[in-house]
Amino acid sequence: MPFTLNGCGTSYYGRKELSDGTYLTTEWIVYLWVPLIPLRSFRIVKAGPRSGMFLFSNQQFVTQKIPLNMPIVYKVYRWAAPVSIALFAFLGWVIYSNS
């Protein structure tokens, strides 16, 4: 299961709905919540109803590992690349201007 701490770690990005009610997604290594490197893809099946309220809601899933889904990877990179470039350019500018 993905885990992030202060925006660093792993997370699911990208989603492709399938006709049987399941969907495909890809787990990524993320830095400041920006996906950098795809690790693996999964087929996600909802295994139970959502329970709880708001921040404490809970829903169970069953995951099935599948080969890396390249269309999802390309789709995520299309928006993540410009965001990554802008983020690192801004961080470089902040570091350069403070030295």
Image (cartoon, rainbow, N blue to C red):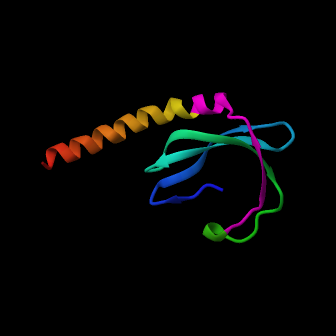
The answer to whether 37 is drawn above or below residue 75 in the figure is below
Image quadrant occupied by the N terminus: bottom right
The residue at the point 48 percent across, 49 percent down is 33
The residue at the point 65 percent across, 29 percent down is 70
Q: State the residue in front, 55 or 42.
A: 42
Question: Is residue 45 found inside the magenta-colored segment of the image?
Answer: no
Q: State the residue in front, 34 or 37.
A: 37
The image position of residue 44, as x and y in percent, is: 76, 48
Q: Is residue 10 left or right of residue 47?
A: left
Q: Is residue 40 left or right of residue 84?
A: right
Q: Is residue 51 left or right of residue 8?
A: right
Q: Is residue 27 left or right of residue 89?
A: right
Q: State the residue in front, 13 or 9.
A: 9
The image position of residue 80, as x and y in percent, is: 48, 36
The answer to whether 12 is drawn above or below residue 57 in the figure is above
Q: Residue furthest right?
A: 20
The residue at the point 15 percent across, 45 percent down is 97
State the count of labels.
0
Q: Quadrant of residue 88?
A: top left
The residue at the point 28 percent across, 41 percent down is 90
The answer to whether 89 is drawn above or below residue 10 in the figure is above
The image position of residue 57, as x and y in percent, is: 68, 67
Q: Residue furthest left?
A: 99
The image position of residue 93, as x and y in percent, is: 22, 41
Q: Which residues are magenta?
A: 57-75
